[in-house]
Amino acid sequence: MRVLITGAAGFLGSHLADRFLAEGYEVVGVDNLVTGCRGNLAHLDDEPGFSLIEHDISKPLFLDSPLDGVLHFASPASPVDYIDLPIQTLKVGGLGTHNTLGLALRHGARYLLASTSEVYGDPQVHPQTEDYWGNVNPVGPRGVYDEAKRFAEAMTMAYHRAHGLDTRIVRIFNTYGARMRPHDGRVVSNFIMQGLRGEPMTVYGDGTQTRSFCFVDDEIDGIYRLFQSTRVDPVNIGNPAEFTIRELAELVMEETGSAVPPDFRTLPVDDPAMRRPDITAARRELGWTPTVSLREGLRKTVPYFRELVGREERWNFKGTPRYDQPDPGSPR
């Protein structure tokens, strides 16, 4: 069995490649390395079942070798990235989805789209169920990501209905773990890096907005189970345990040993007030439920970022380090 994963050098894409390889699949990774890092795949350099194609999936891709699955994970996925790369975000959600759906159709492959909880916008239904249509501002700064994913879902279902393509859609909620980019603007990576550096954690608004955080191993397990299932309608995969941003900051302070008070700033435009998945469908149809608590997951994640901070100190960086590169003089 052979699958193609776009965004394979990204946070989730690289972990997904690991899972499929562990299950005996051959994996073809595709990434243009705009937000992905080669370092996330360095451990697969000598893996015979893995290959990487450097390509922008917003442009067509043709492969002669057979494929059994296509998983579309390519996209800027943090506010810092998709606000800085709005056109690219819309293109990979629109053209990239169209191209990967066409690739799956040509090969008779199963297709899985990585969608997001952002399709619910600033939700008026809590927790969010898959049949909730969302409350999205299509012309706000976050709209480029939200609407790209909503369009991608519509395109995926159109291919399923019009062409009989075997499709899956996962709506991913906040996920964290090793291989997150330390400066990508996501709250968990921001807090951990700030805590390890002894800097105040940046809290937007009053910190009472809520999120649900899923450890990467749990998230990948849910996605893999969805790929193997017969479920066509979208499925929420996330941890339903809900925390305020203040509570997250307190946990990260404990795990990093930080005692610096948070720095409160103005809440960004269209920032959701609350976010928690209803995972009834995942439990019922996939037999999936997350098993790693937030505290346990942070304890598994902090050492990864501690090593990154150590690299900064060893290299004496003045600007933003390239974490996808090995240390100077490293045997890697």
Image (spheres, helix red, strand yellow):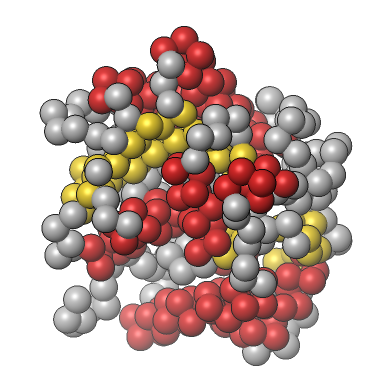
Q: Quadrant of the N terminus?
A: top left
Above or below — where is 247 with respect to 76?
below
Q: Residue at x 58, y 81 (%)?
A: 299
Above or below — where is 92 with respect to 163?
below
Q: Residue furthest top?
A: 162
63, 42: nearer the viewer: 63
- In this image, 312 relative to 127: left or right? left
Residue 248 % position (x, y): 73, 70
Task: Choose top left, top right, bottom left or bottom right for residue 148.
Answer: top right
154, 59: nearer the viewer: 154
Q: Is residue 250 visible in the rendered structure shown here?
A: yes
Q: Quadrant of the C terminus?
A: bottom left
Residue 116 % position (x, y): 60, 41
Q: Residue at x 63, y 62 (%)?
A: 290
Q: Is residue 237 visible in the rendered structure shown here?
A: no
Q: Residue at x 76, y 31 (%)?
A: 132
- Tag count in the figure? 0
Residue 270 % position (x, y): 76, 40
Q: Residue at x 51, y 35 (%)?
A: 230
Residue 263 % position (x, y): 76, 70
